Amino acid sequence: MSSKHALVIGGTGMLADVSLWLVETGYQVSIIGRTMEKHRKLVDKASKPEFITSLAVDYSNYLLLEEQVRKTVEENGPISLVVSWSPIRTLEIINQVLSEQKDSWELYQIKGSRRFFDNEPPLSDSSCQQRSIYLGFTMEGNQSRWLTHNEISQGVITNIKEGNTESIIGILHPYDQRPS
Ligand SMILES: NC(=O)c1ccc[n+]([C@@H]2O[C@H](COP(=O)([O-])OP(=O)(O)OC[C@H]3O[C@@H](n4cnc5c(N)ncnc54)[C@H](OP(=O)(O)O)[C@@H]3O)[C@@H](O)[C@H]2O)c1
């Protein structure tokens, strides 16, 4: 077991390479996603598979989510880093559990482009340092396209390394040029 423990919510999809990078950098990584097959594929790719804990849970099942997160904290130690692609209600449950820990934790919240224009309040009563990463789009010549999973994961990794409070992967302006 590693002394550092991270949680990646939605870590079997577009954030899969973030999950694998965290394993590489020495984290014990707990990963939330519903599909066991996606968990298996990710574990197969990991350099140190024993550093992954697969939590095959629907994050909308709040009771089970809380139970699974408490269990992984008990077994793998306090969580110091959360990378999340999930709805806010899911994060509130995570926040409730992790704010019982002695030490503060970092949250990198991955958000869709529309949320950039919302004035979202931070998580209340939280001991976390909250950081936002917005997913934009990219231009190729005069054509726009959405980001690839690889671009998203690499962008998230860069922002975690730099500890940015707020960042955009790709671009958000001119917003009317985003792909349909
Ligand atoms: N701006 C851009 O360029 C860009 C590019 C790509 C995607 N996106 C946006 O990102 C979003 C996600 O795209 P995607 O579906 O392709 O991403 P994805 O990363 O393939 O899927 C989301 C991840 O969350 C997990 N997940 C989804 N629902 C869950 C639930 N209820 N409980 C637990 N885990 C859950 C998935 O695993 P399971 O399905 O196994 O649960 C998977 O690991 C979309 O809204 C899309 O618009 C934006």
Image (tube, helix red, strand yellow):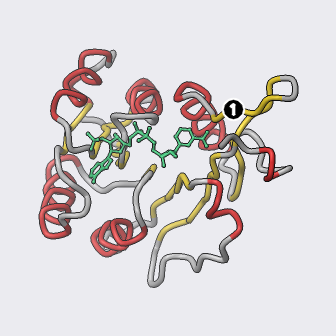
Q: Residues within 10 Å of mark 1 (few under 14, many from 20)?
A: some
Q: Amino acid at mark 1?
A: Arg
Vertical placement of 37 versus 102: above or below? above
Name the element at disc 1: strand
Quarter residue 29 falls in: top left
Query: From the image, which quarter does the C terminus lie in?
Result: top right
The percent coordinates of residue 162 (x first, y second) are 69, 43
Residue under the image location 29 percent in, 20 percent down: 48
Q: Label 1, on which residue? A: 145
The percent coordinates of residue 145 (x first, y second) are 69, 32
Question: Residue 87 or 77: which is nearer the viewer?
Answer: 87
The percent coordinates of residue 20 (x first, y second) are 40, 26
Which image quadrant shows ligand 1? Answer: top left
Considering every residue shown, the one lying at the far bottom of the view is 125
3 displayed left or right of 152? left
Query: From the image, which quarter does the N terminus lie in?
Result: top left
Question: Residue 176 or 173: which is nearer the viewer?
Answer: 176
Vertical placement of 57 versus 114: above or below? above
Vertical placement of 88 versus 151: above or below? below
15 displayed left or right of 75? right
Considering every residue shown, the one lying at the far front of the view is 180
* Dot 1 beta carbon under 8 Å from ligand 1: yes
Residue under the image location 71 percent in, 51 percent down: 167
The percent coordinates of residue 17 (x first, y second) are 45, 27
Residue under the image location 31 percent in, 37 percent down: 28
Residue under the image location 63 percent in, 46 percent down: 135
Total residue callouts: 1
Quarter residue 113 falls in: bottom right
Quarter residue 31 falls in: top left
10 displayed left or right of 119? left
